[in-house]
Amino acid sequence: MLRVAVAGAGGMARVRVRALLSTGQVEISGIASRHLTTAQKLGAEIGCAACYDDYRRLADTHPDALLIEVPHEAQDGIALWALEQRLHVLIGGSLATSTPVANQIAQLAAEHRRVVEAGYEARYSPPWAYARELLASGALGRLVTVRSVALWAGDPRTWYYNQRISGGMPLTHMTYCFINPVRWVAGEVRSVSAYANRIVHTAPELIDQENCVANLLFDNDVLCNMTAGFVAPGGLPAWSVTFIATDGAVEVYPDEGGSGRVIVYRGGRAEEHNYRNGPNAFDAQAQAFVGAIQKGGECRNRPADTVGDVQVAEAIVASVRERRTVWL
Ligand SMILES: NC(=O)c1ccc[n+]([C@@H]2O[C@H](COP(=O)([O-])OP(=O)(O)OC[C@H]3O[C@@H](n4cnc5c(N)ncnc54)[C@H](OP(=O)(O)O)[C@@H]3O)[C@@H](O)[C@H]2O)c1
């Protein structure tokens, strides 16, 4: 059995602990949160008694790996500590909150031969895998443009709305939806030109780039327009990505739970593929993480795959602030 310790005990820690346990190859060695009672609450739910209010105490539980599910401000320090402890690491959010730390994590992972996986589950979800394969097969011709929209009405009282703690909207929200999976399908981003609102819409304090429109230029001249933000009128369908190719198009409607549906347009017809009851992407990612540690299998969000997500988020912020196109 692989011993996995957990830092953070909120919503996503529960999702990922369940996914890790579903592999049948994992036991949770300990849980740490900022407050002991939070760790103990999760501990009681899953039968883990080793609970702490300091993540460093998790070393006492002799883990092989660490799951990090904390607000972004805290995650970099915990990830670097884990690698110094020679632990494999599954990070619930983006690889890091800045490119220098992302590169440092990549370097330490390579040096210590540890598996590090960033927590974007989209690359493990059937709709994204189907769209990627279909486009790569050439069945829809050559990919020309991509458009995406991802509006999310969060709770302004949570850390997601705190600029210092979250790192801002592009890092928190846009890397998930949908920089990371679109890069998986369309290749690398070469340049970024972005605009963001300067008026407070959703909270007493303006989170930077609360609502944002970014134009990305990918390899092979694929053009992409992303709209993302925290203004999300109820009932508006605003969570999808469309890949437009020379002989057809494919539209991905991901679910929060990692499944969803796809519509393929070709020959004047629309064909829907529904994955709502399909395999869970969090489970598949947990399986890949455990498999990579135990058998040397491949993960899809290794540091080399995900440093680029952080770079694009940073380029969006720089483009907005400096009113220029940023070349990567
Ligand atoms: N893949 C996805 O679909 C998805 C969706 C949402 C979020 N996420 C990511 O998941 C991660 C966790 O988000 P969440 O929604 O689970 O957050 P959350 O529910 O707010 O939980 C955060 C937890 O971290 C703890 N914490 C805060 N500061 C800490 C510190 N310095 N050291 C140790 N623990 C600390 C909190 O502790 P106390 O309660 O004890 O104060 C809480 O238990 C984030 O990276 C987020 O971006 C991913």
Image: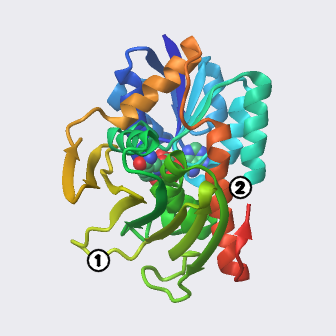
Residue 282: percent from the left, percent from the top? 39, 35
Quick one: label 1, few (<14), some, or many (20+) residues within 10 Å? few
Question: Residue 78 lies in what quarter of the image?
Answer: top right
Q: Position of residue 322 (x, y in %)?
A: 73, 80
- The correct choice, above or below, for 168 with respect to 50 in the image is below
Res. 113 image quadrant:
top right
Q: Which residue is drawn at 70% across and 75% down?
A: 325
Residue 43 shows in this picture: no
Q: Mark 2 falls on what kind of element?
A: loop
- What is the number of callouts on the image? 2
Along the line of sight, which residue is nearer the eye, 215 or 9? 215
Q: Residue furthest bottom?
A: 199
Front in this rendered view, residue 61 or 313: 313
Mark closer to the chain start, 1 or 2: 2
Disc 1 versus disc 2: distance between alpha carbons?
A: 31 Å
Name the secondary structure under disc 1.
Answer: loop
In the picture of the structure, the residue carrying the numbered disc 1 is 233
> Going 51% across and 89% down the picture, which residue do you hit?
199
Residue linked to disc 2: 98
